[in-house]
Amino acid sequence: GAVVSQHPSWVICKSGTSVKIECRSLDFQATTMFWYRQFPKQSLMLMATSNEGSKATYEQGVEKDKFLINHASLTLSTLTVTSAHPEDSSFYICSAPVFSGGAREQFFGPGTRLTVL
Amino acid sequence: AQSVTQLGSHVSVSEGALVLLRCNYSSSVPPYLFWYVQYPNQGLQLLLKYTTGATLVKGINGFEAEFKKSETSFHLTKPSAHMSDAAEYFCAVSAANQAGTALIFGKGTTLSVSS
């Protein structure tokens, strides 16, 4: 199956700094990728849709100036958490859709654990 | 609009017992339905999916689910639980074959397995 990687797998940063998380499709091209956030013991909430060659689409309530998304190529999307604060601490997961067996399936990255001190 | 409701945030079973995790969905268009498993501090692993065709879907690790349109349900079952099945399980829905559509997840069900 298709593989999606994320880097880093975990990061600890000080409040006020910016953190970049990378999401890569390793063996396929993805014109669209999705970014989710998962708080402890909670479900995955869609943050934004990353589109190659155009602006990301953000879900209601997600600050686009705080969570910068850049879909730099057909295999790479980055999420930058700007001026991070402790409430941004979360598990961030990306996914990319692949057509498999005549249907579309999402492949998820392993996630990035962000802790803001 | 689409949504998913997972009944029961926590299910406890004994090893060897039947596992039943409930999922109901709402969708204004034909849905694709998924079950994922997540172990602590890890990403999501696809257990099984329903797209079209046979309504009884078999997945990995002995899990299966049945799509019941009349009941808008997609419950996950396993005949005999193993200790290794203890994890968080998420049901998800997406619009069938619509490019650029993300998954909508339920709140998850924590499965505990006791010996």
Image (cartoon, coloured by chain):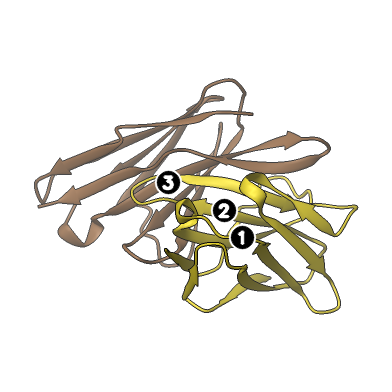
Chain colours: A brown, B yellow
Nearer the observer, disc 1 or disc 3? 1
Q: For the residue carrying disc 1, how many other residues have a C-alpha within 10 Å: few (<14), some (14-19), or many (20+)?
A: some
Indicate the chain on which mark 2 is placed: B
Q: Give the letter of the chain under mark 3.
A: A
Residue where numbered disc 3 is placed: A93
- Measure how far apart labels 1 and 2 are at the Cα level: 18 Å
Residue A11 in the image: state x and y as whole percent. Answer: 21, 39
Mark 1 and 3 residues: CB-CB less than 8 Å, in contact?
A: no
On residue B23, the disc is none
Three-letter code, disc 1: Ser
* Residue corresponding to mark 1: B80
In which image quadrant can residue A85 be found?
bottom left
Identify the image quadrant of residue A21. Answer: top left
Q: Would you place residue B6 above or below residue A79 in this image?
A: below
Rendered residue at 50%/63% (across/down)? B15
The answer as to whether the residues below labels 1 and 3 share one chain is: no
Indicate the secondary structure of the residue bearing disc 2: strand
Secondary structure at numbered mark 3? strand
Q: Residues within 10 Å of mark 3 (few under 14, many from 20)?
A: many
| Sequence-earlier tag: 1 or 2 | 2
Quarter residue B64 falls in: bottom right
Residue A77, image x, y percentages: 45, 33
Same chain check for tags 1 and 2: yes
Q: What residue type is disc 2 on?
A: Tyr
B27 or B114, which is in the foreground? B114
Q: Chain of mark 1?
A: B
Q: In the picture provided, is A29 more to the left or to the right than A111?
A: right
Residue designated by label 2: B36
Camera-side residue of B6 and A52: B6
Frontmost residue, A101 versus A92: A101
Confirm whether residue B108 shows in the render.
no
Return the residue found at the far top.
Answer: A27
